[in-house]
Image (cartoon, rainbow, N blue to C red):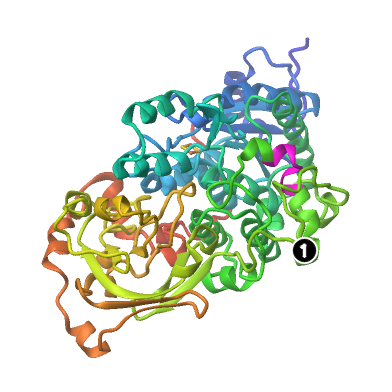
């Protein structure tokens, strides 16, 4: 060991702290407090933050502390200095009123953590639904080399010999209890059996979708997105990710060079082929907005709608993420449809995505179908427009009942999700299988936060009569694990003066997915002249302080990714003023 301070490489961003740019006293302070037993030359090496969303309150991500150790080893091995950076985490199942209210807060805080510190590159460790999007949004705006690693899905749970898909089977079993076809004790048993191990939801819900989308965007190492959380190869992927970020710093491989319009195209193709969550739409739009990429809802429909569904996973199909991994995972899916991918998009490896998937093989065609035998043709998300959704709405045809994709029926309108729950099981409710259930007040501003309540439970009377799907419409989102003929993300939302605020029970609604239309049969002048529902007004109480107020005052609508208007774009990484 020597006390001599090694020369800091000027090319590194961290040299602004550890070099003598601001004078010997300042750099002394920066270096001395960070040494803590590290080698003398540590400040001259690439400084790699490991942004970890590990938290006991985000249980899907709790194991990321272990994965961070593997990343650290890889960073040291490659000649960098790993720096643990715990960041805000978002537990999907617990946070009220919805984890989505805090996605932008997490993204903003992570971006500022990155920018304010002597960091040259970032490893993004996430998993549970909103954590990967928040990390990607932050990294896109911060503009430093970044690489993501998803924490992987949990192992398959079983109940009485049947496998359980977390999320999807909650919706299915709870409807069976309400229909009287499943004993409450069996439902209670399912609660003990569903979450079998560390990891995120094992269906093709939002977490699995965003892991795959991140890989298709090029932001994680190829082949890592479906590695089950307890598997040793995930730790290995952590090590390799740590190695790779050090090289990315040397190459100055920043997110704007990876996340391009071409990469977004590949992400939409991937999401369509795997039967991905509707939530991918809002997250991709927000990420594109951070990088100033011209990419909107119509692009998502145009790119995705001719892509066929190849992956037989819940909620669109039968299997779970462990099966997907065993069958070859995302590379095997993409290799079969490589002609649909944009060959110009590169990944964190610096190589085109299309080169990374060459030779990937499907090992089980019951999980990943061959392109000539798709599970559904034209399975991408459909973007609807019409006088009920002037700025768009989305539906996932792969999770819907085909016969309901073209439907005309009278609206039954609820002013809030609470009113819906209070009234939906009333035996006197005037409702038939043709009724269109409508809930408003659940958009970004209205709830606030755009919760996952759009997969509205069916009326108990109809469930008991054997009805298992109906057309449902809202300005909410829905869990990626859910299913049904559910129209979501109606924009503008009712709280932003959208037409949803003016429709009434009994108005005829037409859903025409093949022609991408969502309309209410009310004269335009009459609709515009109607008062907002008094109930909708009463249900809406605008926040008056704190994050919620900032959010409601500045959040954009779903068709813009529900990001805050002042967070769109990047901030130039000019050296900030010295702190001492
Ligand atoms: Fe965390 Fe589903 S609740 S991924």
Q: Is residue 503 above or below residue 249?
A: below
Residue 63 in picture, x, y percent from top left: 56, 24
Inspect the magenta stretch and tell me whether residue 326 lies in it.
yes
Name the residue rendered at 29%, 42% in the picture.
Answer: 178
Name the residue rendered at 50%, 66% in the picture.
Answer: 402
Q: Is residue 40 above or below residue 566?
A: above
Q: How many marks?
A: 1
Label 1 Cα crowd, 10 Å radius (few <14 / some 14-19 / many 20+): few
Q: In the displayed structure, does residue 569 sit left or right of residue 355?
A: left
> The magenta stretch spans which residues?
324-331
Q: Quadrant of residue 443?
A: bottom left
Q: Which residue is mark 1?
A: 372
Residue positioned most to the right: 359
Residue 19 in sight here: no
Q: Is residue 488 above or below residue 148?
A: below
Disc 1 secondary structure class: loop
Observer-nearest residue: 330 or 506?
506
Task: Tell me the quarter of the image containing the N terminus.
Answer: top right
Q: Quadrant of residue 81?
A: top right
Inspect the magenta stretch and tell me whether residue 477 lies in it.
no
């Amino acid at each position: 060991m020597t006390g001599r301070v090694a020369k800091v490489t000027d090319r590194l961003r961290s040299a602004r702290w550890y070099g003598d740019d601001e004078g010997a006293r300042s750099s002394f302070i920066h270096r001395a407090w960070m040494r803590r037993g590290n080698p003398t030359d540590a400040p001259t090496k690439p400084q790699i933050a490991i942004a970890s969303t590990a938290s006991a309150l985000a249980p899907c991500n709790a194991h990321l502390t272990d994965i961070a150790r593997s990343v650290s080893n890889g960073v040291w091995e490659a000649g960098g200095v790993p720096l643990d950076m715990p960041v805000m985490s978002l537990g999907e199942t617990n946070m009220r009123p919805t984890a989505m209210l805090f996605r932008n807060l997490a993204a903003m805080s992570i971006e500022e953590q990155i920018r304010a510190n002597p960091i040259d590159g970032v490893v993004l460790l996430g998993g549970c639904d909103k954590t990967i999007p928040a990390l990607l949004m932050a990294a896109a705006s911060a503009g430093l080399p970044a690489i993501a690693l998803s924490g992987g899905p949990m192992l398959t749970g079983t109940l009485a010999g049947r496998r359980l898909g977390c999320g999807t089977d909650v919706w299915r079993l709870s409807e069976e209890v309400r229909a009287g076809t499943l004993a409450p004790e069996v439902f209670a048993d399912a609660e003990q059996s569903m979450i079998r191990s560390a990891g995120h939801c094992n269906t093709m819900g939002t977490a699995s979708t965003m892991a795959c989308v991140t890989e298709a965007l090029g932001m994680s190492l190829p082949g890592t997105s479906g590695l089950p959380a307890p598997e040793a190869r995930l730790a290995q992927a952590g090590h390799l990710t740590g190695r790779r970020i050090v090289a990315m710093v040397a190459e100055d491989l920043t997110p704007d060079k990876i996340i391009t319009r071409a990469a977004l195209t590949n992400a939409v193709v991937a999401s369509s082929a795997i039967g991905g969550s509707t939530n991918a739409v809002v997250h991709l739009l927000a990420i594109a907005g951070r990088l100033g990429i011209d990419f909107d809802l119509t692009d998502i429909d145009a790119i995705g709608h001719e892509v066929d569904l190849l992956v037989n996973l819940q909620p669109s199909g039968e299997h779970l993420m462990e099966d997907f991994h065993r069958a070859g995972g995302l590379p095997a899916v993409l290799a079969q449809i490589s002609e649909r991918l944009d060959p110009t998009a590169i990944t964190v490896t610096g190589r085109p995505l299309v080169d990374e998937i060459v030779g990937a093989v499907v090992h089980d065609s019951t999980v990943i179908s061959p392109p000539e035998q798709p599970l559904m043709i034209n399975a991408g998300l459909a973007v609807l427009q019409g006088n009920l959704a002037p700025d768009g709405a989305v539906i996932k045809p792969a999770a819907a009942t085909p016969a309901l994709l073209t439907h005309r029926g009278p609206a039954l309108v609820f002013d809030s999700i609470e009113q819906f729950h209070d009234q939906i099981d009333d035996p006197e409710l005037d409702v038939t299988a043709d009724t269109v259930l409508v809930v408003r007040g659940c958009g970004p501003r209205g709830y606030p936060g755009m919760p996952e309540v759009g997969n509205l439970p069916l009326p108990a009377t109809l469930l008991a009569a054997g009805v298992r799907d109906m057309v449902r419409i809202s300005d909410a989102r829905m869990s990626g694990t859910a299913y049904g003929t559910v129209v979501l993300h109606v924009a503008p939302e009712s709280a932003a003066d959208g037409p949803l605020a003016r429709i009434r029970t009994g108005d005829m609604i037409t859903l025409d997915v093949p022609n991408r239309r969502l309309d209410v049969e009310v004269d335009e002048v009459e609709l515009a002249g109607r008062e907002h529902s008094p109930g909708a007004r009463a249900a809406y109480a605008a926040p008056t302080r704190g994050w919620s107020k900032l959010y409601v005052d500045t959040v954009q609508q779903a068709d813009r990714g529900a990001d805050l208007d002042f967070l769109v774009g990047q901030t130039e990484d000019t050296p900030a003023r010295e702190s001492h």
